[in-house]
């Protein structure tokens, strides 16, 4: 079974090849978003009780780091998404 980190590392060439398009469009391109979604990046903090992988913080940062090596904006977007999910779980 491929881990999320391995999936993200396999996605790095696609991310790099999409950089010109992302810069021109000023957003992540569909192949990058689709690859991140397929790798599970957007749900990496989702608890196992809800069907998510429930990666620990150090694993989450390794995934973000791998995305950032490919392109800083992609890593930033993953971190932003993660931060929103974590903040949503803080009790009031």
Image: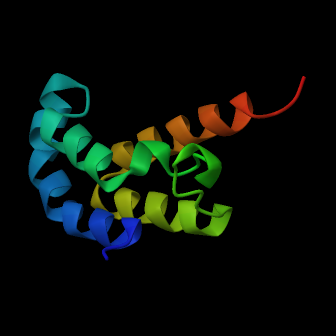
For image coordinates 68% across by 39% down, the residue present is 86
Quarter that holds the C terminus = top right
Residue farthest to the right, as pictured: 92
Q: Which residue is drawn at 41% across and 50% down?
A: 41
Q: Is residue 22 left or right of residue 41?
A: left
Where residue 76 appears, as percent x and y from the top left, is: 46, 43
The total number of labels drawn is 0
Q: Find the residue positioned furthest to the bottom.
A: 1
Lateral position of residue 32 relative to residue 76, left or right: left
Q: For this view, does 78 lie left or right of residue 36?
A: right
When the figure is inspected, residue 63 is found, relative to residue 2, above or below; the finding is: above
The x, y position of residue 10, in whole percent, is: 21, 68
Which quadrant holds residue 11? bottom left
Q: Which colour scheme is used?
A: rainbow
Residue 73 point in image, percent of width and height: 36, 42
Q: Nearer the viewer, residue 17 or 41?
A: 41
Q: Position of residue 24 (x, y in %)?
A: 13, 28
Instruction: Give whichever of 66, 87 is nearer the camera.
Output: 87
Q: Write the residue at 74% across / 34% down.
A: 89
Q: Name the side, left or right, on which 43 lies relative to 29.
A: right
Point 31% across, 77% down: residue? 1
Q: Nearer the viewer, residue 21 or 29?
A: 29
């Amino acid at each position: 079974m491929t881990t999320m980190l391995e999936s993200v590392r396999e996605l790095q060439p696609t991310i790099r090849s999409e950089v010109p398009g992302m810069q021109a469009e000023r957003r992540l391109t569909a192949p990058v978003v689709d690859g991140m979604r397929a790798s599970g990046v957007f749900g990496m903090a989702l608890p196992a009780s809800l069907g998510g992988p429930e990666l620990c913080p150090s694993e989450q940062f390794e995934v973000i780091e791998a995305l950032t090596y490919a392109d800083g904006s992609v890593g930033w977007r993953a971190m932003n998404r993660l931060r929103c999910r974590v903040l949503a779980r803080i009790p009031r």
